[in-house]
Image: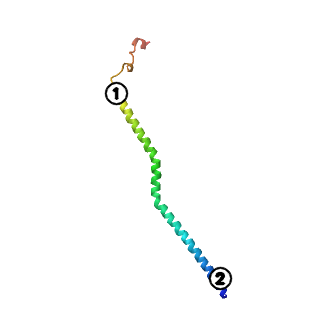
Amino acid sequence: MGRRGVHLRDQSLRQQWQQTQSELARAQAQIAELEALLADLPGIFERKFQQRLEPLLERQQHLLEDNNRLRQELRSLNAAPPRASWILPACDESAAAA
């Protein structure tokens, strides 16, 4: 191998070295991005959980409010004196027997 062959081989090795260094830098950048994403995952899951939970909590609140309102109405009806319209007319036993 002549001087020119050694020079070409050195140049080829340098290019491979530079290419390998470039690939290593890209891989390290990708690892850093993935580590940052991994660190964010708990927060991402927490936000998604809250987004899904919020409508359920609102629905529960509405149901509790409706339940309380209905209980108050029931208490007021139970406490009120009976109205004439609530009392069923007396049943004529002779008509009922027929």
Asked if residue 85 lies left or right of residue 14, the reply is: left
Dot 1 amino acid type: Asn
Callout 1 touching callout 2 (CB < 8 Å): no
Quadrant containing the N terminus is bottom right
Dot 2 amino acid type: Leu
Figure disc tally: 2
- Going 57% across and 72% down the picture, which residue do you hit? 22
Looking at the picture, tell me which residue is in the foreground, 65 or 89.
Answer: 65
Q: Are there few (<14), some (14-19), or many (20+) residues within 10 Å of tag 2? A: few
Residue placed under numbered mark 2 in the picture: 8
- Position of residue 45 relative to residue 94, above or below, is below
- Lower sequence index among marks 1 and 2: 2
**Residue furthest bottom in the image:** 2
- Going 44% across and 41% down the picture, which residue do you hit? 59
Asked if residue 52 lies left or right of residue 78, the reply is: right
Where residue 7 is drawn, which disc sits there?
A: none
Quadrant containing the C terminus is top left
Expressed as whole percent of the image width and height from the top left, the position of residue 32 reads 50, 66
Q: Which colour scheme is used?
A: rainbow
Expressed as whole percent of the image width and height from the top left, the position of residue 36 reads 48, 63
Q: Are there few (<14), some (14-19), or many (20+) residues within 10 Å of tag 1? A: few
Q: Label 1, label 2: how many angstroms apart (C-alpha)? A: 103 Å
Residue placed under numbered mark 1 in the picture: 78
Q: Closer to us: mark 1 or mark 2?
A: 2
Expressed as whole percent of the image width and height from the top left, the position of residue 66 reads 41, 36
- Going 46% across and 59% down the picture, which residue do you hit? 40
- Going 64% across and 84% down the picture, which residue do you hit? 7
Looking at the picture, tell me which residue is in the foreground, 22 or 56.
Answer: 22
Secondary structure of residue under mark 1: helix
Secondary structure of residue under mark 2: helix
